[in-house]
Image (cartoon, rainbow, N blue to C red):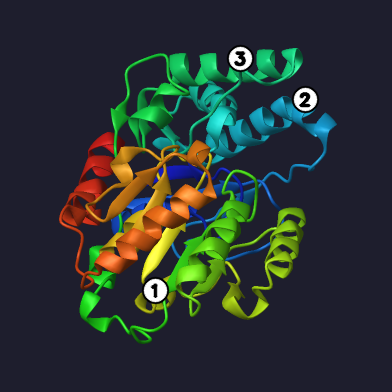
């Protein structure tokens, strides 16, 4: 008889890094485990249909209001506990940041034997208001003291949330999907940059636009592809593009774009995040031979051999100068030297050992 796992998402089942990790696990262990998903949006999105192949999707819709954050504890606790008791799970696998503490408490009360917390981002409660700090501090206490296993995608990610021992498991990629021989460069005269990520302050796409505005002075045929989703911050990006007169140089693609196909025609990735848990997009780019420029807010675990790290405080002009010098040196696209360290097979075996 298959064991049952309740996998809890940080949000929904959109086309994000955390969700890709969740689906990697479900796909590769579905012969031995039933994977039910607990998510918090009530709309169907990117991975919903596939997830239903491996189990049931449960929903506890949460409101996107400030007051809801302060009262959702009992709604999540009660809803999760009822699901766990009714379905009788062997494992709970929480990916929902500090609120993993609520679900871990529910699992503890329901008698779930394996209670796993998985940290994917760098969390920080120092700048929050006092009440919010108490709430998240409570969640942090619960997830540390009631979990049986703790893993993180990088040391920095784990250090930000755990007070007890944890294991670093760098997020994997399915290397069988990345065949560098299928790259389709558009010609030496055009330099193609790419960025993948939600349009928000954290991902810092405005910095990319500023940087590209300087690069185009040396390489007028520069082109930038931005893949992601977002609303208010996207408007700021569009305004900046217009300010620099770069409308013809930038292409926006939706979050459900075939990223692999987009990487095949890309030369460089710019990734100036303020901070990241890991940066799975960087690994995928390096697997396809795309050279990357990342901020020092990204963990060094994301460097498979084709990544330069630059300080955001140096400003976009320094970034542009560094990138221009790298372009002038020239190099044939090649597979990152250490990309095999991120193999999916190794990762899945480690997760399986935790599940038992």
- Residue 223 shows in the view: yes
Residue 3, position as x, y percentages in the image: 35, 45
Mark before the other along the chain sequence, 1 or 2: 2
Q: Secondary structure at mark 2?
A: helix
Residue on which the image places disc 2: 70
Please name which of the two marks, 1 or 2, marks the residue nearer to the observer.
1
Residue at position x 26%, y 56% in the image = 306
Nearest the viewer among 137 and 249 is 249
Nearer to us in this view, 17 or 334: 334
Numbered tag placed on residue 266 in the rendering: 1
Q: Quadrant of residue 235?
A: bottom right
Q: Answer whether residue 50 is visible to the viewer in this image.
A: no
Which residue is pictured at 39% across the width and 72% down the height?
A: 263
Task: Where is residue 198? Give x, y as percent.
Answer: 60, 55
- Residue at the disc numbered 3: 138
Q: Earlier in the sequence, mark 3 or mark 1?
A: 3
In 3D space, how far apart are the residues under numbered discs 1 and 2 (Cα atoms)? 44 Å
């Amino acid at each position: 008889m298959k064991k049952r796992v309740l996998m809890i998402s940080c949000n929904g089942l959109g086309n994000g890094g955390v969700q890709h990790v969740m689906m990697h696990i479900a796909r590769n262990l579905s012969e031995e485990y039933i994977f039910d998903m607990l998510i918090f949006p009530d709309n169907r999105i990117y991975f919903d249909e596939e997830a239903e192949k491996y189990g049931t999707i449960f929903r506890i819709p949460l409101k996107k209001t400030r007051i809801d954050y302060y009262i959702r504890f009992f709604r999540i606790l009660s809803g999760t506990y009822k699901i766990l008791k009714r379905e009788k799970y062997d494992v709970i696998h929480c990916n929902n940041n500090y609120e993993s503490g609520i679900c871990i408490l529910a699992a503890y009360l329901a008698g779930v034997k394996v209670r796993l917390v998985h940290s994917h981002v760098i969390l920080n409660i120092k700048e929050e208001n006092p009440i919010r700090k108490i709430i998240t501090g409570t969640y942090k206490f619960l997830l540390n003291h009631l979990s049986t296993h703790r893993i993180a995608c990088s040391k920095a990610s784990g250090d930000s949330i755990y007070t007890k021992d944890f294991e670093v498991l760098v997020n994997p990629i399915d290397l069988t999907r990345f065949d560098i021989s299928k790259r389709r460069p558009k010609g030496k005269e055009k330099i193609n940059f790419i960025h993948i990520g939600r349009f928000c302050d954290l991902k810092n796409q405005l910095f990319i636009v500023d940087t590209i505005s300087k690069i185009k002075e040396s390489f007028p045929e520069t082109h930038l592809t931005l893949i992601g989703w977002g609303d208010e911050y996207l408007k700021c990006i569009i305004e900046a593009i217009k300010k620099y007169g770069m409308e013809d140089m930038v292409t926006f693609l939706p979050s459900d774009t075939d990223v692999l196909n987009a990487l095949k025609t890309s030369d460089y990735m710019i990734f100036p995040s303020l901070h990241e848990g890991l940066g799975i997009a960087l690994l995928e780019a390096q697997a396809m031979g795309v050279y990357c420029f990342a901020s020092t807010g990204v963990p060094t675990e994301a460097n498979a051999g084709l990544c330069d790290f630059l300080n955001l405080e140096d400003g976009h002009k320094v970034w542009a100068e560094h990138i221009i010098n790298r372009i002038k040196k020239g190099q044939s696209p090649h597979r990152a030297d250490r990309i095999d360290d991120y193999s999916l097979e190794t990762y899945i075996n480690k997760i399986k050992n935790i599940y038992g």
